């Protein structure tokens, strides 16, 4: 017979083994639980801007083997757009893909690259992104507890109108929607009357006749249905439009180096994909306007120079007010503009 003492010792050993085994499986399960990275993007579900982020998330999630998981939240499904930056700063949201210039009230340097007539073409803006990124990363880390992961140049700001504008004199009296402080200044200096409108409200503002038109990106205007409430499109590349990826700095610093590397690589792929799509849209969007029966106005270089001259004092003031940062941005802009100058578009029916 087994003594009671031996039986007690045996049962204690078995119980201890069960505890150790359970602890191992609990620890292993916890280790396998992915850290969720919530990525917000202003565009709606199904929009190419959202799709690119969903593809980014898919690629990243597959490569990090369950340690992290990016989850995309389009539009304002998780937070209001004006709250994105602060939410990333405090960690309420981990990651954002949004126009940094929206938040220039907290630091005016964020909107310098949106200064009217600073960049002259979509190609110039795209060529500048990699040099502009580290300049903005420094600001974001110092001021906003965020890491800049990528910068995208979308396209030029053009005019989507219910009433045509083809000459400098025709800006006068036009009520034009301004989606940023820089656009408001451009409209004002060109003789128009800026009306501050969130880009999500442009459709209803045009539909109700609150504004005569808006200064906005072309493809975004198409995606948001503005063709239904406008009659004229004026191409003049008034300013460069941008979006950038940011991630909470505390989260970034806590990531293993290999995960950081993967995230940077996949963000760069998303930026490159978006740039290639936007170059395709440059041609496709023109055809969309033609098929939609819209009147297309192409501003000549000579006429654009008249418009640009009106904004040069403001441009100079902005650049000089930002010290070394402004000086470096201007150097980058001058370089890419010399390689990719303003090109007058041609209208061709396909």
Image: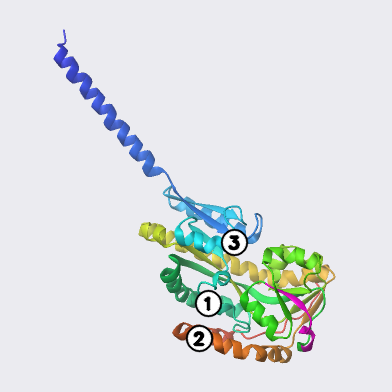
Q: Look at mark 1 in the image and give the residue it sits on.
A: 108
Asked whether the residues under the numbered discs 1 and 2 touch, taking CB atoms below 8 Å apart as contact, a structural biologist would say yes
The secondary element bearing badge 1 is classed as: helix
Q: Which residues are magenta?
A: 169-178
Q: Looking at the picture, how far across and down is residue 66, in whole percent?
A: 43, 47
Q: Does dot 2 land on a helix, a strand or a loop?
A: helix
Residue under the image location 76 percent in, 84 percent down: 171
Magenta span contains residue 121: no
* Marking on residue 81: 3
- Expressed as whole percent of the image width and height from the top left, the position of residue 341 reads 62, 86
Please give left or right for residue 120 compared with residue 15 in the image.
right
Up the image or down, 3 lies above or below 71; here it is above
Q: Quadrant of the C terminus?
A: bottom right
The tag earlier along the polypeptide, 2 or 3, is: 3
Q: Which of disc 2 and disc 1 is earlier in sequence?
A: 1
Q: Is residue 135 above or below residue 323?
A: above
| Residue that badge 2 annotates | 321
Circle 3 residues within 10 Å: few <14, some 14–19, many ≥20: many
Which labelled disc corresponds to residue 208? none
174 magenta-colored:
yes
Residue 10 left/right relative to 345: left
Q: Quadrant of the N terminus?
A: top left
């Amino acid at each position: 017979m087994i003594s009671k003492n031996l039986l007690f010792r045996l049962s204690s050993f078995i119980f201890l083994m069960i505890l150790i085994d359970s602890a191992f499986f609990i620890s292993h399960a916890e280790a396998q639980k992915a850290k969720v990275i919530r990525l917000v993007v202003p565009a709606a579900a199904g929009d190419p801007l959202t799709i690119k982020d969903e593809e980014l998330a898919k690629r990243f999630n597959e490569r990090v083997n369950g340690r992290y998981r990016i989850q995309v939240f389009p539009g304002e499904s998780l937070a209001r757009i004006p709250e994105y930056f602060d939410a990333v700063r405090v960690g309420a949201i981990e990651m954002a893909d949004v126009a940094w210039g929206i938040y220039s009230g907290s630091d005016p340097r964020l909107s310098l690259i949106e200064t009217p007539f600073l960049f002259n073409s979509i190609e110039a803006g795209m060529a500048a992104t990699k040099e502009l990124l580290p300049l903005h990363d420094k600001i974001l880390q110092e001021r906003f507890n965020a890491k800049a992961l990528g910068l995208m140049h979308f396209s030029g700001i053009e005019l989507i109108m219910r009433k045509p504008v083809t000459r400098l004199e025709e800006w006068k009296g036009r009520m034009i929607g301004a989606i940023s402080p820089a656009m408001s200044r451009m409209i004002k200096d060109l003789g128009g009357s800026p009306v501050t409108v969130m880009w999500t409200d442009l459709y209803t503002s045009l539909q109700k006749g609150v504004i005569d038109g808006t200064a906005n990106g072309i493809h975004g205007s198409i995606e948001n249905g503005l063709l239904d409430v406008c009659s004229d499109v004026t191409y003049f590349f008034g300013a460069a439009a941008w979006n950038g990826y940011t991630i909470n700095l505390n989260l970034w610093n806590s990531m293993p180096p290999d995960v950081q590397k993967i995230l940077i690589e996949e963000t760069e792929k998303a930026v490159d994909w978006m740039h290639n799509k936007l170059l395709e849209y440059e041609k496709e969007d023109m055809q969309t306007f033609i098929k939609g029966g819209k009147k297309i106005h192409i501003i000549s270089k000579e006429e654009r120079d008249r418009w640009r001259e009106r904004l040069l004092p403001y441009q100079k003031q902005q650049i000089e007010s930002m010290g070394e940062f402004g000086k470096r941005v201007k150097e980058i802009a001058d370089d890419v503009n010399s390689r990719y100058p303003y090109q007058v578009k041609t209208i061709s029916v396909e």
